[in-house]
Image (spheres, coloured by chain):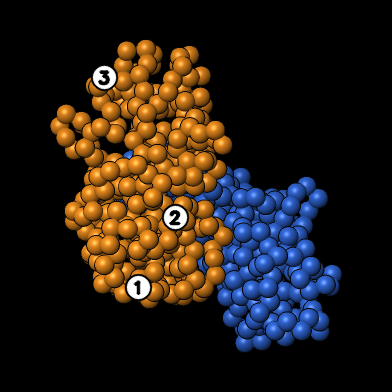
Chain colours: A orange, B blue
Amino acid sequence: MKRIRLIVAYDGTGYCGWQVQPNGITVEEVINRGLSRLLGEQIRIIGASRTDSGVHALGNVAVFDTNTRIPPKRISYALNQYLPEDIVIVRSEEVPADWHPRYCSSVKTYEYHIFNAGVPDPTRRRNTAFVSYPLQVEDMRRGAEFLKGTHDFASFCNIKTSVEDTVRTIYDLEILVQGLPGGGDWEKGREITIRIRGNGFLYNMVRIIAGTLLRVGRGYYTPEQVKEILEAKSRQAAGVTAPPQGLLLVGIEYRDAACL
Amino acid sequence: MKRIRLIVAYDGTGYCGWQVQPNGITVEEVINRGLSRLLGEQIRIIGASRTDSGVHALGNVAVFDTNTRIPPKRISYALNQYLPEDIVIVRSEEVPADWHPRYCSSVKTYEYHIFNAGVPDPTRRRNTAFVSYPLQVEDMRRGAEFLKGTHDFASFCNIKTSVEDTVRTIYDLEILVQGLPGGGDWEKGREITIRIRGNGFLYNMVRIIAGTLLRVGRGYYTPEQVKEILEAKSRQAAGVTAPPQGLLLVGIEYRDAACL
């Protein structure tokens, strides 16, 4: 028996999120089905991050156990033949039998992509949140500063969760601005990326941070209010949850030697 | 009677191209239908560029005549309510009654987007051509130099066309390289953009140029062979037509004072 780790990329548009559920097709379910067909065994993967409906990933992580003789590094190629084009296995490799994608300490990187322009760009609608109000990026950056470090992020956690410890650490939170094909004027718009690295994220945390920083960018909140929102430790205090299609799980790094 | 010009953006994935045709739904048809409903008149737009199935646009141009009392600049907002989310009217404005999007001298800008990485990125599959071979960008740039200027581009024209004059002028042809979310290493890939500006393009010309430069990037052709291909004036000489989803019509500038 071998334990195999998969690095998984997907366009989440067509899926009801990662985790198997009764209401619709999920990424986990499609991979389970592909693996079971490929290997002739009943496979159930364990994922690191249970992304929401419509959220994308370049580097989610999953594991499963198998008796296959296919060399571990070849499984990704073979499995991709059994998957639709909106799910791609980036890499596969053997890990120790007790390696678990959620019990090992890790650093996750997410990006929240905003298309900020006078009119929407239909070619970007699946991967960005569209905001037609010209955002004050410098204010967003000042507001973001208050979120860096170790804090109780209770204000940035969906209340539909049972997690008790809402303390997390954000190592980096940067806001990047990019022009678009054709130049950088306002009509053509710009893409604003909130890039965030942390040791773990609460349910909807990145999307609530994005929704809160969007309000700072629009002038609803001052940058200093982000500090007050954090201190309030109440979901009521923060901005709305930004829409799912802007969110991208970029990758997960495992840091402990025992977990590499 | 007023003549209205529209700037049109679309995600071409779900369409059989721009031009109305019997085999499937087209961008032109959907806009005609939306306009006819909005204005209560039978409208048939005239487009500047009849993009192929699967090709995208940020700035295609179309005109139509109407008796509506809706202010010209407001038509874009109103019409967007009648269109699906993969077609967006960026701008609308009145033009002289004899203004025609194809009879006025113009400069068109296209981009051909390539995702160059070890494995495909599912979130980019609709807007890029995937190439897993590490492309030699400097060779592509050297090959591209031969295409700049005024030439007979017969080698870069789909033979299914009746056009007689195959001389065109390319003002700029640059090849841009961008890292991707998460950094620029090979596993995460890079996006290579062939950006081209010219006074007109033959049927499939940009895609055949892209296909030819891709062969240079892979080492099938030397950069100098691009000059020979151009001089051969035969479609047989050039590379394959690169796939449609990589192509984006960025915009069209009209230059003659009479055509502004």
> Could you say where residue A97 lies in the image, as x and y percent from the top left?
26, 19
* Front in this rendered view, residue A204 or A116: A204
- Name the residue at 33% across, 23% down: A4
Distance in Å between CA atoms under marks 1 and 3? 49 Å
Which quadrant would residue A46 be assigned to in this image? Answer: top left
- Which residue, given by chain and number where applicable, does mark 2 sit on? A246
> Could you say where residue B142 lies in the image, as x and y percent from the top left?
39, 56
- Which residue, given by chain and number where applicable, does mark 1 sit on? A221
- Name the residue at 77% across, 63% down: B33
- Name the residue at 54% across, 70% down: A119
Front disc: 1 or 2: 1
Q: Image quadrant for the N terminus of chain A?
A: top left
- Give neighbour class at mark 3: few <14, some 14-19, many 20+ (Cα, 10 Å): few
- Which residue, given by chain and number where applicable, does mark 3 sit on? A97
Distance in Å between CA atoms under marks 1 and 2? 21 Å
- Give neighbour class at mark 1: few <14, some 14-19, many 20+ (Cα, 10 Å): many
> Quick one: SS at disc 2?
helix
Would residue A79 be found to the left or right of residue B46 on screen?
left
In this view, B149 is above or below B120: below
Q: Amino acid at mark 3?
A: Ala
In this view, A203 is above or below A22: below
Q: Amino acid at mark 1?
A: Tyr
